[in-house]
Amino acid sequence: MGKLKFEFAVIPKPDDNKSNILGLVSITDTQENSYIMPKEYQSMSLHTELIKAKTFGMIKQSIKKRHEKRKVWINLTSEMENIYFKDENMQFNGFLLEKIEIKEEKATENADHLHTKQNKLKLAERFSIEKFSKSTTNVTQWLRIF
């Protein structure tokens, strides 16, 4: 294991939603598998080995506002490998992290659906109603149709 991509974000403090803290939101490995960090483990005070990394200083200076995010690759030390990776499983101090499943939809299907042309006259008839007139005697029925 050489390096991992860590996603850092400024998040609300768990016990006080008015204050902001820097947190570790997710971890991605070299095969582009992403793992989400549970909220109780997101605070950077728990990730002491990451704080020691040189890249962390740049991250801390670059993000200040709530919900700003940065994804950076960090080379792992042996201590970091013990904390974040064990037996080919992504973990944090013995807690296995949940893998994020990314669903990809085919763009061609959506594009084909958007380009289907319908007769505009039929669409206008479907979405318009008759005006209230003397021939329409029941007002409540006309309002339900409207």
Image (tube, rainbow, N blue to C red):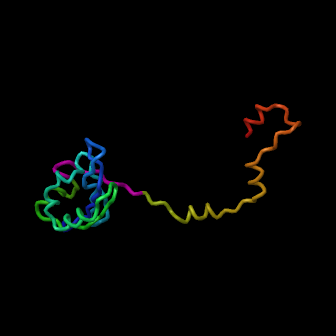
Q: Residue furthest left?
A: 79
Figure quadrant of residue 123: bottom right
Q: Is residue 57 magenta?
A: no
Give the percent coordinates (x, y) of residue 50: 17, 60
Give the percent coordinates (x, y) of residue 145: 74, 38
Q: Is residue 31 above or below residue 101?
A: below
Number of dots carrying numbers: 0
Question: Which of the two residues, 106 or 128, is positioned nearer the viewer here?
Answer: 128
Give the percent coordinates (x, y) of residue 51: 16, 60
Task: Report whether residue 86 is seen.
Answer: no
Q: Residue at x 32, y 57 (%)?
A: 65
Q: Quadrant of the N terminus?
A: bottom left
Q: Residue at x 30, y 45 (%)?
A: 18
Q: Which residues are magenta?
A: 92-102
Task: Report whether residue 89 is seen.
Answer: yes
Give the percent coordinates (x, y) of residue 133: 86, 39
Q: Residue at x 30, y 48 (%)?
A: 12
Q: Is residue 18 above or below residue 49?
A: above
Q: Quadrant of the C terminus?
A: top right
Question: Which of the two residues, 117 or 130, is positioned nearer the viewer here?
Answer: 130
Q: Residue furthest right?
A: 135
